[in-house]
Amino acid sequence: MATNPRTLAERPPTLPPGDELERFAGYGVMGLPFASGHCLALRHFAASSIGPGYTSVWHRNPAGRWVMYTSSAPDTGCPRYFSRALSESRTATITVTWTGPASLQTTVDDTIDWSLTLTRSPATRAMSVAGSLLPAALWRNDHVLALMARVAGPLLGVGRVGLTGTAPNGQSFRANPRRLWAVDDSRATVDGIDLGAPGPLPDQARLGDFWLPQRGMFAIGEAYFTPVPAASG
């Protein structure tokens, strides 16, 4: 059975059932902090219940300013859920290229050039095995996800983990990272500035109840959001 992240990530994702929710499937870097105070994240959701698949790159600078770049219209991508916590969102041309079985490069227009390599550890293997064995119904159970989050934080050494909660724009969310790898090494430039070596932030970054890990983590899985009720009257 194939276990390298490239082979698994390039398989066409299938949207899980749940018409009452907005659903996404694919892969991404849950977050990668740099010792310089910057933080990057990646979402590549090839399957979406609310529009075409899309890619999004998130950047936080040392002052805490967040910019989200997305290949889709903001209302069908990540800004739909996070825009109230952002300084800016931009539509951009984003290219994700797998350069090896466990390495990929992401570019955002002429603004971001980001490469990384992934690795497996006993902790990520254990979480991935648990994720593959957990029945689908339990992935939809907030109490189970809260327990998983409490275990995952210290086990993976990533700080606080939020698999459920409320996004800045008011939707509740549920994250299902079914397979995990750690970021082994990464190099990135933003606007020509080298972000330096990966390393934890002095204060863990978050957007609403979604906490960015204090160590780079790559995941394959799904995400669910509750739609905002239409205004009455």
Image (spheres, rainbow, N blue to C red):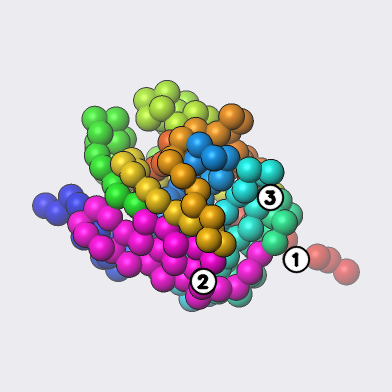
- List the residue tagged with mark 1: 230
Q: Residues within 10 Å of mark 1 (few under 14, many from 20)?
A: few
Name the disc covering residue 65, or none. Answer: 3
Left or right: 140, with 82 as reference point: left
Residue 171 versus residue 46: which sits nearer the camera? 46
Residue type highlighted by circle 3 = Arg
Screen quadrant of the C terminus = bottom right
Q: Position of residue 143 (x, y in %)?
A: 50, 32
Q: Position of residue 109 (x, y in %)?
A: 51, 73
Alpha-carbon span between mark 2 and mark 1: 38 Å
Q: Confirm whether the magenta stretch covers residue 130.
A: no
| Nearest to N terminus: mark 2 or mark 3 | 3
* Rendered view: 133 above or below 14: above
- List the residue tagged with mark 2: 110
**Residue positioned 40% across, 51% down in the render:** 187
Asked whether residue 56 appears in the rendered view, the answer is no
Tag nearer the camera, 2 or 1: 2
State the residue lying farthest toward the left.
Answer: 1
Residue type highlighted by circle 2 = Asp
